[in-house]
Amino acid sequence: MKNLRRVTFLVLAVCASYRSAVAQTNWSGTWTDATSVTNISGGGNSISASFSYKGGDYSGSGSWSNCRVVWNIAKCNWTATHNDATKSGTRTGTLEVTLSGDVITGAYHEAAPQWSYKPGYNASNVNSVMVDGAVFAINFKRSASTQPVSPPATRQPTSPLAQPNPN
């Protein structure tokens, strides 16, 4: 009987841990930061994403692929097309992110980008932070539009004193 209680306890503990982990791994949705929007789809151990970013004189779009997800941590490859005033091209690399509720944090790790320079520009006169080995922080928040919205609760008066005065 003692062994049956131990097994039951272990099974319940594992089930509770699994339910907690599943609740914390809702990757799907729209995620944003100051300059980008990322749309993640999938779940469990298989997710993918598309993203776009835009700043004053630059823009780009890309995707996450080959993601390996364990609980609330994902490791993926990423690729993006980039365009700015001096160059355009393809960026690639890896990323690792951690999901915690409505926040995703982590980092993009850049591989050597492949640039085509615009007239008057070349590798020697363009300084860029997008270089082999660069690391860019990820700090996304879940977009409110992807969350179900409940109507505000209405409160009914509970005391005759709280009733409006008809006079």
Image (cartoon, rainbow, N blue to C red):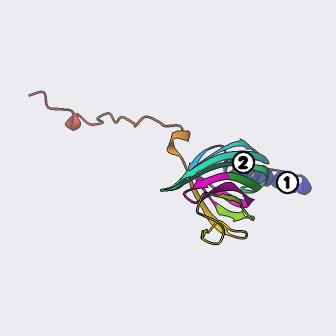
Query: Which residue position holds label 1?
Result: 5
Dominant SS type (magenta): strand
Q: Residue at x 66, y 43 (%)?
A: 28
Q: Residues within 10 Å of mark 2 (few under 14, many from 20)?
A: some
Q: Residue furthest top?
A: 166
- Place of residue 33 in the rendered image (x, y in percent of width and height, measured from the top left): 53, 55
Q: Which residue is drawn at 60% across and 58% down?
A: 119
- Place of residue 19 in the rendered image (x, y in percent of width and height, measured from the top left): 72, 48
Q: What stretch is highlighted in magenta?
A: 81-105
Which mark lies nearer to you, 2 or 1? 2
Which sits in the foreground, 22 or 94? 94
Q: Residue at x 22, y 34 (%)?
A: 160
In screen coordinates, is 148 left or right of 129? left
Which sits in the foreground, 49 or 91? 91
Work out whether residue 147 can be spotted.
Answer: no
Quadrant of the drawing holding the C terminus: top left
Tag 1: amino acid: Arg
- Place of residue 130 in the rendered image (x, y in percent of width and height, measured from the top left): 65, 65
**In this view, 129 is above or below 73:** below
Tag 2: amino acid: Val
CA gap between label 2 and label 1 equals: 26 Å
Q: In which quarter of the image is residue 108?
A: bottom right
Which sits in the foreground, 87 or 47? 87
Q: Residue at x 50, y 56 (%)?
A: 57
Q: How crowded is mark 1: few (under 14 residues within 10 Å), some or many (20 or more)?
A: few
Query: Which residue position holds label 2?
Result: 22
In screen coordinates, is 78 left or right of 161? right
Work out whether residue 7 can be spotted.
Answer: yes
